[in-house]
Image: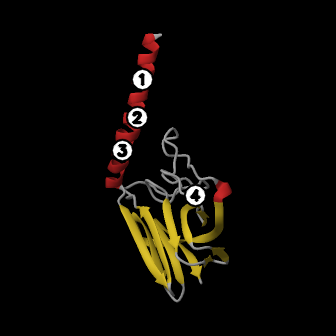
Amino acid sequence: MRFIKRLIATLLILMGLFYFVGLPYLQKQTKKHSPEKTATYNYDGAELSVHYSGPFKKNRTIFGALVPYGKVWRTGANEPTTFTTSETIKIIDKDLPAGTYSLWTIPNKESWKVIFNTEIPDWGVTLLSGGKETTRDSNKDIVQVEVPVKRMNKEVEQFTIAFENNEQIYLSLFWDTSKINIPLHK
């Protein structure tokens, strides 16, 4: 009985060390390879921002391989990408109230589904799946739209999210030779 108590105590200590020391260390190490970035934009008084981690291509095949087609992607690396708006805006024709949301995508060859979700999980993927399964709760989706993929002539080495204004405000995501533009309206 005494042995079992010691074993349980030892296991609890090891799990605590992993959770409070090991896991933060691993998360910090992954950010060296996929640095955190923030893009901001003032849209007629509405403050917009997107916070994400941008992985690099590193001679890998990205879409259809590293990021599989038809599966939910946390849209970047490390913690889920977040999108914040200080006022209600429209994503294409759907209202997105003021707030902070996790941003998820389902890439496909010709179009991507873009999902804004009210929940922001800690890491966005399950560790047991090796990062292949997301922790997104689809019941918390608030806006979902679909946009076409544009092919670029030049490869983009690092995953990038930016606000673009070409007579229309877009939240643009691009990596490798793929780009999507998500129209934003007030």
Residue hosting label 1: 9
Q: Is residue 147 left or right of residue 178?
A: right
- Cα–Cα span, label 3 and label 2: 15 Å
Q: Nearer the viewer, mark 3 or mark 2?
A: 2
Given the current orientation, which residue lies at the most extreme bottom position? Answer: 167
Given the current orientation, which residue lies at the most extreme top position? Answer: 1
Residue hosting label 2: 16
- Mark nearer the N terminus (3 vs 4): 3
x, y (%) of residue 122?
49, 51
**Label 1 sits on what residue type?**
Ala
Q: In the image, which disc is placed on residue 150?
A: none
SS class, disc 4: loop
The residue under the point 46% across, 69% down is 50
- Cα–Cα span, label 3 and label 4: 23 Å
Residue hosting label 3: 26
- Cα–Cα span, label 4 and label 2: 26 Å
Q: Nearer the viewer, residue 89 or 130?
A: 89
- Cα–Cα span, label 3 and label 1: 24 Å
Render colour scheme: secondary structure
- Cα–Cα span, label 2 and label 1: 11 Å
- Mark nearer the N terminus (2 vs 1): 1
- Mark nearer the N terminus (4 vs 2): 2
The residue under the point 42% across, 18% down is 7
Q: Is residue 38 left or right of residue 108?
A: left
Residue hosting label 4: 119
Q: Residues within 10 Å of mark 3 (few under 14, many from 20)?
A: few
Against 16, is 138 above or below?
below
Q: Nearer the viewer, residue 24 or 159?
A: 24
Q: Is residue 25 left or right of residue 95?
A: left
The answer, for residue 157, to whether it is visible in the render is no
**Label 2 sits on what residue type?**
Gly
